[in-house]
């Protein structure tokens, strides 16, 4: 769920609460508000799939936080992620050390992806759309 989805979800809940609890709201306004919010969600989703400009407005980009076992301090600051949160993701990935990790990526939904540094890592093709990753900065 991205930020726009969260806003629509909260707005739908708030609208439903207002319809049910407020005597000042005409019953016909409720379905109109729901239709407007659902229509807006549909239009934004449709545009996100079919254009290149809209996704950058409603979604963030995945960001590289660790590469080659080294924390990327500038990326941590930019994304407002603490070192403790990265270490927690590393532990949840089953690693006992950041040195055992090839990369940690903050995904667009706010979750962390942890890629191990083992011999079974064939290439870096999954990192090609990640902010902070380029072929010149490989460890």
Image (cartoon, rainbow, N blue to C red):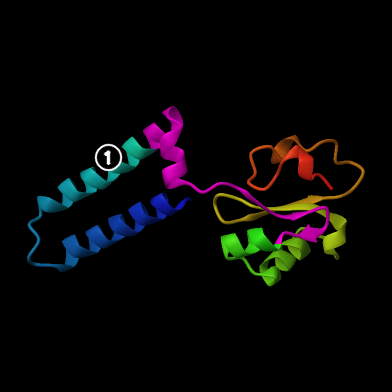
Which residue is depicted at the point 7% across and 65% down? 24
Say whether residue 10 is left or right of residue 32: right
Which residue is depicted at the point 23% across and 64% down? 17
In this figure, what is the number of numbered marks? 1
Q: Position of residue 137 (x, y in %)?
A: 77, 45
Q: Position of residue 95 (x, y in %)?
A: 83, 61
Identity of the residue furthest to the bottom in this view = 84
Q: On the image, numbered disc 1 is attached to which residue?
A: 39
Which residue is depicted at the point 78% across and 40% down? 136
Q: Residues within 10 Å of mark 1 (few under 14, many from 20)?
A: few
Of residues 113 and 32, which is closer to you in this image? 113
Of residues 127 and 136, which is closer to you in this image? 136
In magenta stretch: residue 52: yes
Of residues 42 and 72, which is closer to you in this image? 72
Say whether residue 67 is left or right of residue 106: right
Which residue is depicted at the point 63% across and 46% down? 131
Tell me which corner region of the image, top left, top right, bottom left or bottom right, holds residue 27: bottom left
Query: In the rendered view, would you say 11 is above or below 128?
Result: below
Q: Which residues are magenta?
A: 45-72
Say whether residue 115 is left or right of residue 36: right
Regarding mark 1 in the picture, which secondary structure is present there?
Answer: helix
Q: Position of residue 103 (x, y in %)?
A: 76, 51
Q: Position of residue 56 (x, y in %)?
A: 46, 42
């Amino acid at each position: 769920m991205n930020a726009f989805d969260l806003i629509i979800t909260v707005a739908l809940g708030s609208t439903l609460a207002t319809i049910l609890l407020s005597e000042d709201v005409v019953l016909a306004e409720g379905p109109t508000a729901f239709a407007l919010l659902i229509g807006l969600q549909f239009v934004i989703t449709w545009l996100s799939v079919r254009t290149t400009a809209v996704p950058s407005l409603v979604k963030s980009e995945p960001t590289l936080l660790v590469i080659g076992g080294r924390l990327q301090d500038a990326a941590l600051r930019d994304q407002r992620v603490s070192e403790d949160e990265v270490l927690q993701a590393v532990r949840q990935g089953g690693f006992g050390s950041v040195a055992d990790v090839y990369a940690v990526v903050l995904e667009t939904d706010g979750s962390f992806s942890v890629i191990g540094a083992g011999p079974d890592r064939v290439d870096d093709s999954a990192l090609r759309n990640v902010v902070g990753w380029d072929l010149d900065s490989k460890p």
